[in-house]
Image: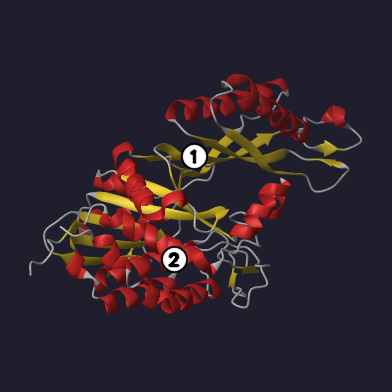
Amino acid sequence: MSHPVPAVLAGLDAIRPYLEDVYKDLHRHPELGLREHRTAGKGAEALRSFGYEVTDGIGGTGLIGVLANGDGPTVMARADMDALPVRERTGLPYASTATVTGPDGTERPVMHACGHDVHVTCLLGCARLLAGNRDAWRGTFVALLQPSEENGEGAEAMIADGLTSRSPRPDVVLAQHVLPYPAGYVGTRTGPFLSAADSLRVTVHGRGAHGSAPQAAIDPVVTAAMIVVRLQTVVSRELAATTPAVLTVGSIHAGSGPNVIPDSAVVELNVRTYDDATRTHVLDAIGRIVRAECEASRSPKAPVIERISSFPPTVNDEETTRRVAEAFAAHFGDDAHTIDLQTASEDMSEIPAAFGVPFTYWGIGGTDPDRHAEAVRGGTVDEDIPVNHSPYFAPVVRPTLDTGVRALTVAALAWLAARPASRA
């Protein structure tokens, strides 16, 4: 049997201008979660033109494109579509100037600050190459475009809307994410890769009074401050030094003026963990500390602890990841790496879980390699390399798109069986 990768990737040079046009168009027209109507429409139109059978409107704006190409395994590759409420400051000629009207009636800027435009473009590139080279492989390829990853709603919405009955059941699910590594880099990791993420809103109650008469009040600002301080000990004093976790208090709101003690305060925080035991321990510790500080402050009412968003951990299947890593090593050579543990979070793993199948998720680089190397030499990577969600986040077009298309294609072809070589 001939190996299908060279035959399929031989068409990459010819579609490169198409891919760049698609990417710049998507970057220029970002859409927030569950509003990705234009993006989904472009994706559906492209997949149909390649010969895929498209089912759209799954979970709102989600869709799948199915290309059946004879007997063989079924591979699903997923890309997320949504952007972020960020004002772009990249200065690119194709930078976004898009805005949307928020729930409060104000205009909000929108930007592809996380690279989902790269993900969609690379998946369409892979889908086109596979469709154009059907003689090189057999099986079924499913391209899935998912909405609203940033809000953790999209995978669940597609599943609730019957994804598992509307799509062929895959043997494996694949996905990737562009990250602030040098462009050309591809990184895999077995086991835990992305963290679970839990965002909580804590409301503590007090008794309001004049700022000049604190003895008449129960000050919720002080209670909130003590909670924030005490929470810093959860990771540093309750977890082993070898157990990775992050607990960040990102927002505190209380009061309306300097001389008024309010009757409540709201603290919002975020937790990142990599296994169920640590996740449970940290969340339980938060509840214990909040309740204890409120009791110590004589709060008149029990605190309210709400979970406002939740992402599962992304834990790569060992055998599946090893198979992809070997394929990457054979194709990318020294550009194939083992990637570090990441503290970002994703909802992608809910899709293979719904099908009951294994998955692997990897990272590709998007930073100009020379700029990245200079930052490494100067020890200024954290300061000089824009990360995902930054208003300056701008993956370089080349070789980022090439790498992403190649990675998805090589990974898919690690399952999609090669057709027998023809005999003279």
| SS label for mark 2 | helix
In the image, what residue type sits under mark 1?
Answer: Ser
Which dot, 1 or 2, sits closer to the camera? 2
The residue singled out by tag 2 in the image is: 402
Viewer-closest of 245 and 12: 12
Q: Is residue 80 visible?
A: no
In the image, what residue type sits under mark 2?
Answer: Asp
The residue singled out by tag 1 in the image is: 195
The answer to whether 150 is drawn above or below residue 401 in the figure is above
Residue 326 percent across, percent down from the top left: 33, 45
| SS label for mark 1 | loop
Crowding at mark 1 (Cα within 10 Å: few <14, some 14-19, many 20+): many
Q: Is residue 86 left or right of residue 212?
A: left
Residue at the far front in the pictured view: 424
Tell me the CA gap for discs 1 and 2: 28 Å
Q: Give the residue displayed 38% in from the left and 61% down from the top.
A: 406
